[in-house]
Image (cartoon, rainbow, N blue to C red):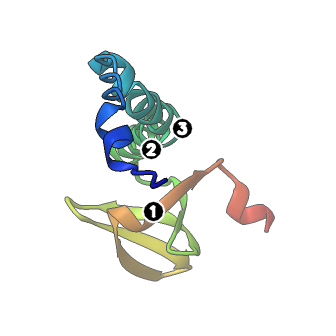
Amino acid sequence: MSLSLIPVAHAAAAPAAAPASNPLITFLPLLILFGIFYFMLIRPQMKRQKEVRAMLSQLAKGDEVIAAGIAGRVDEIGDSLVGVEVAPNVIIRVQKAAITQVLPKGTLKSS
């Protein structure tokens, strides 16, 4: 007696077609991931940039600042450069973008 698998294979029913998936369900993980990135990375960075721009636009002569790790008092303000007095009669010029922090008044005298 010989068993043939070919007729059995032809007799098997075709697999059922996969149900049509909703495109929203397909992209839902991607949308959730974008939402997480927006609230955890993009939004805080945009807020920080806005605060830095506001700080640099309000910069005035006499403000005590930290510029590239150097503490000093603002002596002159230009469009892109700022003169910072780091010691009596010693003024260095730094880019406005290098100013990272405006210190409270009187901070340099106490250190």
Q: Nearer the viewer, residue 57 or 14?
A: 14
Kind of residue at disc 1: Ile
- Residue 96 x %, y %: 34, 62
Q: Quadrant of residue 22?
A: top left
Kind of element beneath mark 3: helix
| Disc 1: CA contacts within 10 A as few (<14), some (14-19) or many (>=20) | many
Q: Quadrant of residue 30?
A: top left
Q: Is residue 18 above or below residue 79?
A: above
Q: Nearer the viewer, residue 90 or 107?
A: 107
> Of the residues tagged 1 and 3, which is closer to the observer?
3
Marks 2/3: CA distance?
9 Å
Kind of element beneath mark 1: strand
> Of the residues tagged 2 and 1, which is closer to the observer?
2
Please give the residue where the numbered disc 3 appears in the rendered image: 40
Quarter of the C terminus within the rendering: bottom right
Q: Tell me whether circle 2 and circle 3 mark residues in contact (CB < 8 Å).
A: no
Kind of element beneath mark 2: helix
- Residue 43 x %, y %: 44, 34
Q: Kindly identify the residue that appears in the image at 69 percent across and 64 percent down.
A: 108
| Disc 2: CA contacts within 10 A as few (<14), some (14-19) or many (>=20) | few
Q: Which mark is residue 15?
A: none
Please give the residue where the numbered disc 2 appears in the rendered image: 45
Please give the residue where the numbered disc 1 appears in the rendered image: 99
**40 to the left or right of 46:** right
- Residue 51 x %, y %: 44, 39
Kind of residue at disc 3: Met
> Of the residues tagged 2 and 3, which is closer to the observer?
3
Q: Kindly identify the residue that appears in the image at 32 percent across and 31 percent down.
A: 11
